[in-house]
Amino acid sequence: MGNAKSHFMRKLVWTTVGLTYILMAWGNIVSSTGSGLACPDWPLCHGTVAPPIRLDFIFEWGHRVLAFTATIFILTTVYKVLTSTNHNAALKKSGKSLLALLLTQILLGGLTVMLGLSLTASTVHLIIAHLVFGGLITVASVTQWGDQMVVPGNEKLKRLSIAGLGAFLVQLALGAMVRHGHAGLACSQFPNCLDGFFPVPFGFETAVAFVHRWWGFMLLGLFIHIAIAAGKTRSALTGVARAICLVALLQVGLGIYTVLSGLSIPIRAVHAAVGYGLWGMLFFLAIRSGGLRGLWSNGSDSKGSTPGWANPSPVR
């Protein structure tokens, strides 16, 4: 029975992670296609749960339906964490924080529509979505690896990945401001911004586009450093670190092509989806290398292990 429950929980949480990722990617399609106000009211769409069949309605209403589905899965996951006798206080506290973030995210979703896609509300909405995503990855990893959560000998990877998460949050905020501030073509050339490398005039739109672009290149350098550091230590996490580096290279290339294509909607959608995946991979690397331990462990033992769910998988 214990094995069956453990297997069900792993499937539940990883499914929730996948649904949340799809929801985030779908949300970008909504904003990229300008469908964010296709349903100007909330939580209904033009006062009904069955709006007319129109592409922008499908994007926006479909996003809300998917959000409702993902919310049910997230709430079920949090409930399982809070009612389990196998988890320590730290993970249960994170479960409560995840619940608070989810409720905030739902309210922000409605507020964003009511405020006509406010730049501030939209940016905060995106940041919280990534925090929820990271929290779910943490719970999923605990259910999968239990007391083998931390791969030993990765102190440098831990420091680099945590620094990467902080820098990535800045990049995500910048990207949201570029998207929702309609600054995607404020720097329409590459590598120049306008007529020169530095944008003139240096207004809000050109500033956020310029900083977002070159902050991304700085992040790429950090991700390359992570891959090199993992290779030198021959870490069991080397494959993840190298995958992060390759995905980051792809992301930078997509960012350049997004501008040169004149903000092609399919390219913008892929660019965002790859970025969300990159965040998830980096978060996974951070927790498995021993970082962010307060999210899932009470630190009661020297190895930083956590009891986890019964009979966790030994697969690293």
Image (cartoon, helix red, strand yellow):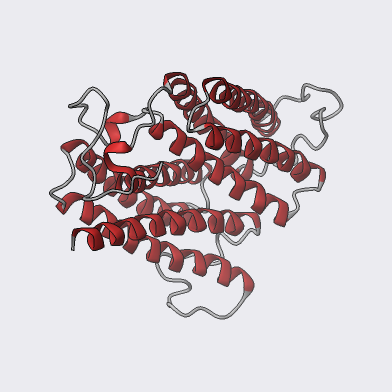
Q: Position of residue 266 (x, y in %)?
A: 71, 57
Q: Which residue extends farthest left?
A: 85
Q: Quadrant of residue 48?
A: bottom left
Question: In this view of the protein, which residue sits in the foreground, 45 or 274?
Answer: 274
Judged left or right of residue 22, residue 215 is: right
Q: Position of residue 126 (x, y in %)?
A: 48, 45
Quadrant that contains the C terminus: top left
Q: In this view, does 129 lie above or below 204?
A: below
What residue is at 46 percent from the left and 19 percent from the top?
156
Q: Is residue 261 above or below residue 75?
A: above
Q: Is residue 39 above or below residue 284?
A: below
Question: In this view of the protein, which residue sits in the foreground, 103 or 284?
Answer: 284
Q: How many labels does the image show?
A: 0
Quadrant that contains the N terminus: bottom left
Q: Where is residue 149 in the image (x, y as percent from the top left)?
A: 33, 37
Q: Position of residue 261 (x, y in %)?
A: 81, 48
What residue is at 42 percent from the left and 70 percent from the top?
44
Q: Which residue extends farthest right?
A: 195
Q: Quadrant of residue 196?
A: top right
Question: In this view of the protein, which residue sits in the foreground, 189 or 238?
Answer: 238
What residue is at 26 percent from the left and 40 percent from the top?
94
